Amino acid sequence: MALEMDKYTYRVTWSEEDEEFVGLCAEMPSLSWLATTAEKALKGIRSVVKECVGDMLQNNEDVPAPISTRKYSGKFMVRVPPEVHRHLVVEAAESGVSLNRIASAKLAH
């Protein structure tokens, strides 16, 4: 499991409210770790994730798969207000591209 632990998506950011760095794991959003340095925050969140995964395995709970190892089709449905849909169709037509191309380009930014 140590190898899988390295594949999770970790992030460290500054918390103005706590006046410390906070370590986060995207696959386990309920977990965090506060520390005085970014390095300690990363080490702390990795440690708490490892402990949590160990507990989950011990209790026969499903452990979240790392985002980096999941397969994605490249398709998903997005609902938008009708006026946004119309605006995008017009923009696509004026640009000479598909609605999908316009939406994809906007999401990429």
Image (cartoon, grey):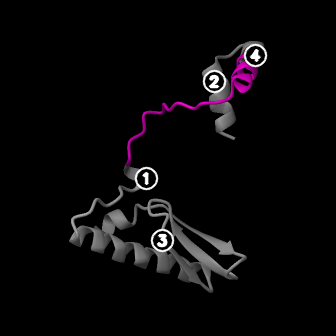
The secondary structure type at the circle numbered 1 is helix
- Name the residue at 68% across, 25% down: 102
Q: Amino acid at mark 4?
A: Val
| Of the image marks 2 and 1, the number of the one nearer the N terminus | 1
Q: Amino acid at mark 2?
A: Arg
Q: Nearer the viewer, mark 4 or mark 1?
A: 4
Q: Amino acid at mark 1?
A: Ile
The secondary structure type at the circle numbered 2 is helix
Q: Nearer the viewer, mark 3 or mark 1?
A: 3
Is 75 colored magenta in this rendering?
Answer: yes
Pointer 3 local density, CA inside 10 Å: few below 14, some 14–19, many at least 20: some
Q: Quadrant of the C terminus?
A: top right
Task: Give the Cα distance between marks 4 and 3.
Answer: 44 Å
| Of the image marks 4 and 3, the number of the one nearer the N terminus | 3
Task: Give the Cα distance between marks 4 and 1.
Answer: 35 Å
Whether tag 3 and tag 2 are in contact, CB under 8 A, the answer is no
Residue indicated by mark 3:
31
